[in-house]
Amino acid sequence: MNAINAAGWRPSMGGADNNEMKSATVSGDHGLMLEEPLSFELGAEGKCGVDFAEADRPPMANISRFLRKGTPPLPGLTEPEAVRHYTRLSRQNYAIDLGPFPLGSCTMKHNPRLNEKIARLPGFADVHPMQPQKTVEGALEVIEQLADWLIRLTGMASVAMSPKAGAHGELCGLLCIRAALDARGETRDVVLVPESAHGTNPATAAFAGFKVEAIPATPAGRVDLEALKARLGPHVAGVMITNPNTCGLFEPDMKAIADAVHATGGYVYCDGANFNAIVGKVRPGDLGVDAMHINLHKTFSTPHGGGGPGAGPVVLSEALAPFAPLPFVTRGSDGEIHLVEEENRAEGHGQAFGRMVAFHGQMGMFTRALTYILSHGADGLRQVAEDAVLNANYVLRSCEDILPAPFAQSGPCMHEALFSDAGLAEGFSTLDIAKGLIDEGFHPMTVYFPLVVKGAMLIEPTETESRAGLDRFIASLRSLTTRAKAGDESLHSAPHFAPRRRLDETLAARKPVLVWPEA
């Protein structure tokens, strides 16, 4: 690899002399990748992509007070300027259609276009929460079918569909646990959270009013079962456990953990963000789980932020099912689907802890998820888990000779491979590898998480990456590691070929510039 000078150019590029390179570097333009000003900098007063006719009558008297006192401070752009501006910006953005997002615990898989087509059908895309139920029977049918699949895949008794994302689902599960304890007349104020759990778990438990106590991990990266048992008692409301955990490992003592917690009157919450690794292979209900959220925008396509809010349905055991929040969809004895929005003790809906949201507002996620499930079927979903685990182990075994893999000796990983930056040259760290990957054309992996591993690099390739694609990523990761071990100083200033160079992330977090200052 050619050395990169301070300006970010390879000396052998293009035959241009130094003056030409310096001039081009100042402009920021590189071939078809142009330095893009803000729309306010491009625009000029008096320009517009649309011609507006002068009003042929004065405004109505009762709305005249709402008229603007002057021209709004908007950028004036012609139609070609506006189209080219946003097209050029899109070229500077990384996307799942350009390459993999190897973010650990995020499951950023390819999103099938069929899902998008279904989600955009007018009957789903235009549905409104205030419509009469009789006009949205198709939407309710989708919710009911999806709920049935989630119950069957997890081996649970019921599901609350209204939570909007993972942490929202965590809160829903803990509020169900609190409602169940209240119904038993018990006051339990402690939730146990293993070190290998997701970072939102302790935050959610604290937000729900519980005290949080940490449970250590074993040297093999799993929950210390004996340490957990020693902390159990009448004050413990339950445990929040992530399985597979954030080290990319399955918890083999999951059933023993659940049995111990249940024996002392507590409940088991499982973080389902990593369900992609076990879907179709393991039913959490069979392991003693009482509540678990499922990120539809992870396991069942629609990567984060794709087309609207997230969705974090919470599956519940028989013990917690009566306390599920409103509203929910159910099929009545008459065979018809109903949206239950009010408590009715006579019909068995009188123990709901309340509401998480006013409406089911994530139809886009529901339709995408059900389309994904129906496209795969039970056998296909099982293959999703198997391929995701296979890909992660391929990455693990392809790089463990050059990057320390703290738990590789424990056996195969699940859906994500975990590495450490131990062994790099002095002064080099995970951040240098991550920034170097940008120059190689890849989105970086999750960095510095989980905290139990020094300089953690958590890589989740998902099931949708081919072997050829993984080989490209692995080759880049190995090359960057070799350079970092050799002390290649150019890594400290990477990325060099991205639209922006390395930022001062500390300064950006402490003093963000969020608005365009008016002249």
Image (tube, helix red, strand yellow):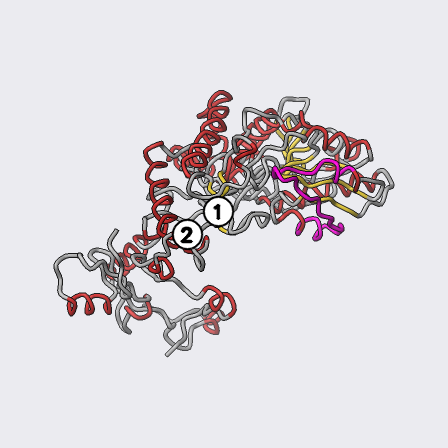
Residue plotted at (83% across, 44% down): 235
Mark 2 residue crowding within 10 angstroms, few (<14) / some (14–19) / many (20+): many
Q: Secondary structure at mark 2?
A: helix
User: In the rendered image, which residue does mark 1 sit on?
Assistant: 457
Mark 1 crowdedness (10 Å alpha carbons): few <14, some 14-19, many ≥20: many
The disc at residue 434 is 2
The residue positioned farthest toward the top in the image shown: 379
Tell me the residue at 54%/50% (across/down).
454
Whether residue 222 appears in magenta in the rendering, the answer is yes
Question: Can you say whether 29 is above or below 143 in the image?
Answer: below
Amino acid on which the number 1 mark rests in the picture:
Met
The tally of labels here is 2
The amino acid at mark 2 is Ala
* Mark 1 and mark 2 residues within 8 Å of each other at the beta carbon: yes
Q: Whole-percent x and y of residue 516?
A: 40, 71
- On screen, residue 24 versus residue 446, left or right, reads left
- Residue 238, horizontal then vertical, whole percent: 75, 40
Measured from the top left, where is residue 256 in percent x and y?
Answer: 72, 29
Q: Is residue 288 left or right of residue 165?
A: right
Instruction: Name which of mark 1 and mark 2 comes first in the sequence.
Output: 2
Asked if residue 197 lies left or right of residue 505, the reply is right
Q: Residue 490 placed where, x, y %? A: 33, 59
- Rendered position, 289 above or below 21: above
Residue at the location (39% across, 32% down)? 114
- Distance from disc 1 to disc 2, alpha carbons, whole Å, reads 9 Å
The quarter of the picture where residue 329 lies is top right
Q: In front here: 519 or 133?
A: 519
Left or right of 261? Residue 32 is: left
Q: Residue furthest bottom?
A: 519
Asked whether 401 or 290 is in front, the reply is: 401
Q: Which residues are magenta?
A: 203-229
Q: Is residue 30 magenta?
A: no
